[in-house]
Amino acid sequence: MKKYSSLLMFMAGCLLLNAQKVSFEEYDLSNGLHVILHQDKTAPMVVTSVLYHVGAKNEEKERTGFAHFFEHLLFEGTKNIERGEWFKLVTSNGGRNNAYTTDDFTYYYEVFPSNNLELGLWMESERMLHPVINEIGVETQNEVVKEEKRLRYDNSPYGNWIFEVRKHMFDKHPYKNIPIGKMEHLDAATLDEFIAFNKKYYIPNNAVLVVAGDFEMEATKKMVADYFEEIPRGVTVNFEKIEEKPITSPKTAEAFDVNIQIPALFTAYRIPEKTSRDSKVLDMISSYLSDGNSSKLYRKLVDEKKMSLQVAAFNMSMEDYGLYVILSLPLGETTLTSISKEIDEEVKKIQSDLISEKDFEKLLNKFESDFVDSNGSVEGIANSLAEYYAIYGDTELINSEIDIYRSITREEIREVANKYLNPNQRLTLNYLPKSN
């Protein structure tokens, strides 16, 4: 045992020695825009990105889908970038770009050869200062979003499981919806409502600008000031967490899907926000249960007992709350009830016994490796810097978050499992085939 543990600790140490600390400089412009600069001259490329602290949870209950809709809409064009020219402008200058929306924020980015840094800054300043929001853009993107919903959710096997879970796990909080939203809400929205949403959230004092890669620090600071300082500050956004009552008795539900032939079991627990220490412990429990072929649930249900085609446990961490989900697809004549019993047995073991030192060292080694990988690209670093500042309020976590995982003990894993993963705190969703 000692020999094995020593080897793992040596490997983890080697990984961390090879991982360089991420250096950065951060400051605020007079309009409230937070700026983070990370210089890395190892490759002639640069990332410009903007994170807006607005996601699906900030929408009105009868206007879901707005944040995700804006992810698309703000590529339509600006005062100085004609409609349909955004992507052409990026690709013709050797770049690429994308965006994504979560429950808590929206993130846009461009990757350019380093000599096109100014172009990236100008384009993001245009998006913030001069977006064109008109009827043709709204109508066009409405159809795009509807097609995305059809492909990713309505016509995809198991596509709507997350909506079915959320609507039972949250009574009042907007997390009961998913970012794609409801199409009838988008159809009913007026142009004035879209303009008002943009004015409220897509403002410098609700945003983080990150520049990462090969650039000159002082010249870049001047460009940032030139392109962003003139953008007017908006009204300060007040974020208020909507509190949910604790779940104290078991919930059960069924959902039906015409796109599947094999049923699925989803077991979900409501857990604390992603910034909490307990959420980090639950990350480790997830990995212990289902990360890789040697994990407890995979080895038991898939390899040994041949009861399941697939099994997974994961922490869906969000800014206000999280969801801890365990799912499984049965094999052959196996019932969802029997799978649930087997899963419960493994969870109870974590609650009653300390995981072995060997398994604990393997967990730590994995999280050390993941930490190194997360800072392995300039794009990843830019994204992490923005999120650590906006959601955690601590940009330095890009270098120190691993210390939290290192400090977690086996006793704490047992304690957190007992705190959150109990039958009276969960939803059991049987996700079943439905005939056409």
Image: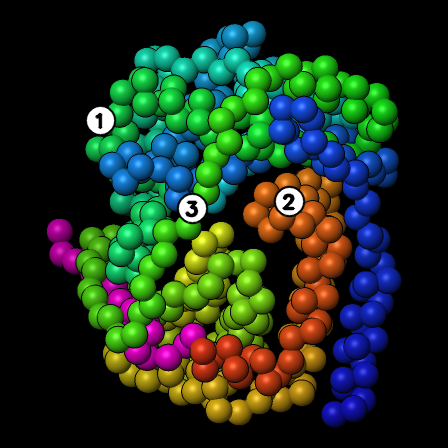
Res 188 label: 1
Q: CA distance from mark 2 to mark 1?
A: 35 Å
- Residue 206 is left or right of residue 144, and the answer is right
Task: Please tell me how crowded label 1 is: few (under 14), some (14-19), or many (20+) other residues with Cα within 10 Å.
Answer: few
Q: Residue at x 82, y 56 (%)?
A: 19
Coloration mode: rainbow
Label whose residue precedes the other's in the sequence (3 or 1): 1
State which quadrant residue 44 falls in.
Answer: top right
Residue type at mark 3?
A: Glu
Please state the extent of the stretch shown in magenta in the rendering.
420-436
Q: How many marks?
A: 3
State which quadrant residue 410 falls in.
Answer: bottom right
Return the residue nearer the eye: 335 or 83.
83
Residue of label 2:
389
Residue of label 3:
240
Label whose residue precedes the other's in the sequence (2 or 1): 1
Residue type at mark 1?
A: Ala
For discs 3 and 1, the disc positioned in front in the rendered view? 3
